[in-house]
Amino acid sequence: MKDSVIAAQQTPSAQRSTRDLTRAAVSGWLGTAMEFMDFQLYSLAAAIVFNKIFFPDVSPAIGLIAAMATYGVGYVARLAGAVYFGRMGDRLGRKKVLYITILLMGASTTLIGALPTYATIGILAPILLVALRLVQGFGAGAEIAGATVMLAEYAPVKRRGLISSLVSLGTNSGTLAASGLWAVLLAVLSEDQLLSWGWRLPFLLSFGLMIFAVWVRRSLKESPVFEERPDVVDGVALARDEAESVIATADEHQGSVLAAGIRQRKGKAFFLALGLRFGQAGNSGLMQTFLVGYIATNLAVGRSVPTDAIVYGSLAGFATVPLIGLLGDRFGRRSVYLALSALTVVLAFPVMLLITSGSTSGVMLGMVLGLNVGVLGLFSLESVTMAELFGSRTRFTQLALSKEIGGILATAIGPVLAATLTAVTDSWWPIAAMLVVYSLITFGSAYLAPETRGRDLVRLEDAV
């Protein structure tokens, strides 16, 4: 075993061409776009039609809460997927996991479009919807974490923030595609057509994207960082007991390198990453999920206005995301994080005043501002910062868990809590207050976090 480890450490660094980097970037962008397209398709359907076709025997307010709760169920499955596939990715490599997750997400999303409704099979319809939501979430729990890790580990150090932001651009692309499809459906179909068959089309169309993403990933090479890890032998990471035996017999340098990652107490980096995730995830759940249904149900504007606003905000994000990535490369992750989260706090109440003004232009401007500053901007930084916080031995697992636990605490629970609070208070102010709280948590985490720009991602230990 010792000889195998020494031989592995003496091999040349894994080399990747520009073509390999391009393929990794396209793969990460496609997979993340598909994940967010799937989830945005579902969240918009939950806000607009699922309360009528899967929960028709309750009041509109209770139906919206039930639909949002079903949306949140997927985040429980995402946590299970993060644990299972995260460990697999750290042990056997990133590529294998990304191939499996794309298949799980694509198949379950397509099948949602083929589900019979409550009117056809009764209570079995929402049960099947929840089951497919669980499968979808199980695959998605590791997809964005895997894409984030893969792209960060491929990227050149000086452009790591910009290139890693492509993962966030994938989320933006998926959101735009899903919102665009729903905007078209709402514009051209009548209410009866939408409820009878139109809602199925976006889910069924996602099948083509899945096939293309699988094709791209078949030729993707493994992460160079994974191959260079000192604890990886013949493509498989050493178990803890194996690594400890190597530490005991290796020379001082080799033993210290392995010991740094094997024996470090975990926790500090994880909780910092969880806090960084909290603001983006919570703001996303409010801006991209809850507010779509809230605007359509409570404000005197056209039914297509909230989805149109998401489309415009996503289009603006194609400039916001790479810009924030560049700023992170230029000024560091921490300072840009502090500025964005503080700006979100300042804008929370003005943005909600715009959205609830009753004017179409106010809704549009408020949604575009909130989405780009409090969601997409933070996500651009999150993609690279969380990867840099963790050591390579447990990067996939810790990144996936911090993302998904943050999702459960903020994104999944947030829309349900917002629906309840706005119903009780008959006001919009709880939404603004939640935006402030989420963003302050991220501000505090960024303040306590170390600067990670330029960190060597092959190192086994966490940054703190």
Image: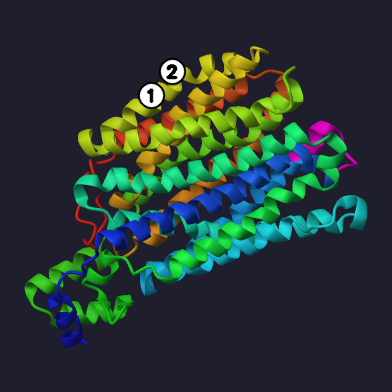
Residue 24 drawn at (x, y percent): 36, 59
Q: Nearer the viewer, residue 371 or 413?
A: 371
> Percent from the top left, x then y, of residue 214?
51, 66
Q: Is residue 159 above or below residue 234?
A: above
Q: Quadrant of residue 89?
A: bottom left
Q: Are marks 2 and 1 in contact (CB under 8 Å)?
A: yes
The residue drawn where x is 28% and y is 58% is 154
Instruction: Look at the picture and state if 222 lies above or below 56.
Output: below
The secondary structure type at the circle numbered 2 is helix
Q: Residue 394, position in %: x, y?
A: 34, 63
- Give the residue displayed 31% in from the left and 63% down from the top: 20
- In the depicted structure, whether residue 364 falls above or below residue 446: above
- For badge 2, the amino acid type reads Val
Q: Which mark is residue 105?
A: none
Left or right of 368 in this view: 342: left
Is residue 254 at least partly visible in the picture?
yes
Q: Dot 1: few (<14), some (14–19), or many (≥20) neighbours within 10 Å?
A: some
On whether residue 67 falls in the magenta region, the answer is no
Would residue 139 be found to the left or right of residue 441 on screen?
right
Magenta span contains residue 61: yes
> In the rendered image, is residue 80 in sight?
no
- Mark 1: amino acid: Ala
* 60 left or right of 331 in image: right
Q: From this view, report whether residue 86 is shown above or below residue 236.
A: above
**In the orientation shown, which residue stands out farthest toward the left?**
252
Residues in magenta, as a range: 55-65
* Residue at the spot of label 2: 346
Per the image, the residue denoted by label 1 is 342
What residue is at 22 percent from the left and 62 percent from the top?
Answer: 458
Residue at mark 2 to residue at mark 1: CA–CA distance? 6 Å
Foreground residue, 26 or 272?
26
